Image (spheres, helix red, strand yellow):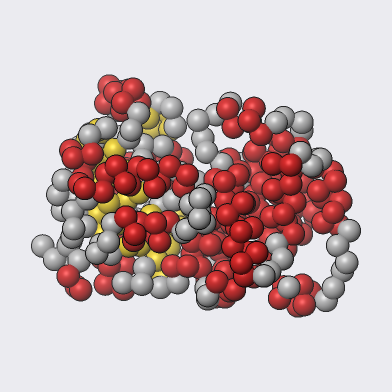
């Protein structure tokens, strides 16, 4: 069965990545009535536990997986015949994982990035990476304000499905949506991905501030100035300014900077309270994407010749040993300017 524009309608959905987000999407799709669904993970031990317990005890314990879900570490078994392939692995693993599985991804499948990050070696967006590794397939991006556990629990969520292929976006909108999972289409793939990646860095920044108990006024200022940095970079790269006022921009930024389930915010809090980066990351299987994204973002900013002072201070704290208090003092010491001028800088 083929939809408009030659995109195959999804006879089966394969999810690449058995972390919290991939698992949550599997639970959602099962609830929405997707009959043929596969969840691939490279950790055979975890896949065995998922099969035995019908839940993901490492990432989303106590939430039942659909009975029809096939959990596997076999790429051929997961991907053969899939009409939609959702890639939900951390950005720094994405290239190696997709390269390994590429030969089994059907030529007619629509490929969806559900990863909010930048490829660490060259700063590629996930849609660029997928387009290079899986040429000829329609590529889309799923992004917006969404904590995995809430999606898995069936709580209301509104997201964006972005693609330059409007036919593919509409087909995916129908295939992936559900009663409590609303999807809006968007053509600005670049803007959606930059917003989704950079909000994680800003969440680390607000976590640093909250860890020092600097108050809600300071957090609001960081979110606002963080949004200005994200817009500045996105527009310089060719994104549409309006994208950053929507779900993938402001919506996701606010959630990640303030929500109790934000792993990037939590990492910032713990570092501000004296723990080292390696210690914080080693204490949880969850990945804080902002740690890897900030260096790539700064490289893009240098190429575009724009300033990103919050990103610079976050990087200095994470990788150069700068004290959190000194980093925040550096931001406060910047010369005040008219707000409109600061947004353009």
Comparing 42 with 18, the one in front is: 42
* Residue 32 visible to an observer of this rendering: no
Farthest left residue in view: 1
Q: Is residue 328 left or right of residue 262?
A: right
Q: Is residue 135 left or right of residue 128?
A: left
User: Eyeballing the image, is 344 above or below 280?
Assistant: below
Task: Report which quarter residue 75 is drawn in.
Answer: top left
Comparing 246 with 279, the one in front is: 279
* Residue 60 visible to an observer of this rendering: yes
Comparing 90 with 39, the one in front is: 90
Residue drawn at the location 58% of the way across and 54% of the way down: 296
Residue 245, position as x, y percentages in the image: 58, 70
Q: Is residue 171 left or right of residue 265?
A: left
Comparing 199 with 293, the one in front is: 293
Task: Report which quarter residue 262 is drawn in.
Answer: top right
Image quarter hosting the N terminus: bottom left
Image quarter hosting the C terminus: bottom right
Residue 56, position as x, y percentages in the image: 37, 30
Numbered label tally: 0
Residue 31, position as x, y percentages in the image: 29, 45
User: Eyeballing the image, is 306 above or below 280?
Assistant: below
Residue drawn at the location 18% of the way across and 60% of the way down: 108
Residue drawn at the location 64% of the way across and 39% of the way down: 266
Residue 122, position as x, y percentages in the image: 50, 55
Residue drawn at the location 70% of the way across and 62% of the way down: 308
């Amino acid at each position: 069965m083929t939809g408009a524009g030659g995109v195959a309608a999804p006879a089966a959905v394969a999810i690449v990545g058995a972390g919290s987000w991939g698992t949550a999407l599997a639970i959602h799709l099962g609830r929405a009535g997707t009959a043929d669904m596969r969840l691939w993970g490279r950790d055979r031990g975890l896949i065995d536990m998922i099969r035995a317990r019908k839940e993901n005890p490492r990432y989303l314990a106590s939430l039942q997986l659909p009975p029809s879900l096939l959990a596997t570490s076999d790429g051929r078994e997961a991907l053969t015949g899939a009409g939609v392939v959702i890639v939900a692995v951390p950005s720094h693993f994405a290239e190696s994982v997709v390269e390994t599985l590429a030969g089994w991804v059907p030529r007619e499948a629509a490929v969806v990035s559900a990863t909010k990050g930048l490829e660490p070696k060259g700063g590629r967006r996930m849609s660029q990476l997928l387009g290079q590794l899986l040429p000829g397939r329609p590529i889309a991006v799923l992004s917006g304000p969404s904590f995995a556990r809430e999606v898995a629990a069936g709580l209301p969520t509104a997201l964006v499905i972005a693609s330059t292929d409007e036919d593919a976006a509409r087909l995916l909108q129908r295939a992936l949506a559900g009663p409590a999972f609303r999807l809006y289409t968007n053509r600005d793939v670049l803007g959606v991905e930059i917003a989704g990646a950079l909000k994680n860095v800003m969440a680390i920044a607000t976590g640093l501030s909250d860890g020092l108990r600097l108050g809600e006024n300071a957090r609001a200022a960081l979110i606002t100035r963080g949004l200005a940095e994200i817009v500045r970079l996105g527009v310089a790269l060719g994104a549409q300014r309006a994208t950053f006022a929507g779900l993938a921009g402001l919506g996701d930024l606010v959630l990640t900077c303030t929500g109790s389930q934000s792993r990037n915010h939590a990492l910032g809090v713990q570092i501000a309270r004296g723990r080292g980066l390696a210690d914080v990351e080693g204490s949880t299987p969850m990945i804080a994407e902002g740690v890897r994204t900030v260096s790539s973002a700064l490289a893009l900013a240098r190429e575009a010749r724009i300033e990103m002072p919050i990103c610079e201070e976050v990087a200095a704290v994470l990788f150069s040993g700068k004290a959190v208090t000194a980093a925040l003092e550096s931001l406060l010491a910047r010369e005040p300017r008219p707000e409109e001028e600061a947004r353009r800088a």
